[in-house]
Image: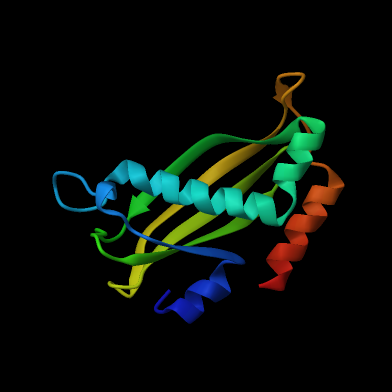
Amino acid sequence: LNNMDEFRTEFPLVISQDLVWSDMDACQHVNNAVYFRFFENARIAYFEQVGLIAFKEETQIGPILASTSCNFRAPLTFPDTIHIGARIESIRPKTFKMKYAVYSEDLQRVAAEGEGLVVFYNYQLGKSCEIPATIVSAINALQDAK
């Protein structure tokens, strides 16, 4: 991904935010744990976009993060504006895999890439469940709109 146009083409959902001073650690770059918060911000924005947050509030059925990872490509430092992209890579009956990337305006490149495995979960019963067709349709609509 060589520029923002390619980045926006790759990800159907992109949010932007400024880095804050407290994101940095003693080594004077953004601490590794902060990247997972960046991914979470994009993941929740994606969930809101496809109606998952409202669906969970109504039904007590929704997403739960099973695993996540990050590959660091370049150190971020304050000040900078970043763009965080999210997409769903694959959907199975009870799970989906999300891909994320963090693009730095100052560096003009991707600073980190990650992924997360999300399980659909019935919070009342305390166990996984199938993803409802309405949610799959909303995901497909967002993915196809890119």
Find the residue positioned furthest to the right.
133
Residue at image location 83% in from the left, 42% down from the top: 132
Residue at image location 53% in from the left, 73% down from the top: 8
Left or right side of 133 for 94: left
**Residue 77, x across and y down, in percent:** 23, 59
**Residue 41, x across and y down, in percent:** 51, 50
User: Which color scheme does this rendered protein use?
Assistant: rainbow
Left or right side of 89 for 57: right
**Residue 54, x across and y down, in percent:** 75, 44
On the image, which quarter does residue 105 sit in?
bottom left
Q: In this view of the protein, which residue sits in the foreground, 117 or 141?
A: 141
Q: In this view of the protein, which residue sits in the foreground, 133 or 89?
A: 133
Left or right side of 124 for 101: left
67 in relation to 145, above or below? above
132 in relation to 125, above or below? below
Is residue 92 in view? no
The image shows a total of numbered marks equal to 0
Find the residue positioned furthest to the left.
27
Q: In this view of the protein, which residue sits in the foreground, 1 or 25?
A: 25
Residue at image location 26% in from the left, 51% down from the top: 30
On the image, which quarter does residue 89 sit in?
bottom right
On the image, which quarter does residue 92 sit in?
top right
98 in relation to 82, above or below? above
**Residue 99, x across and y down, in percent:** 53, 54
Left or right side of 12 for 139: right
On-image quarter of the C terminus: bottom right
On-image quarter of the N terminus: bottom left
Is residue 125 in view? yes
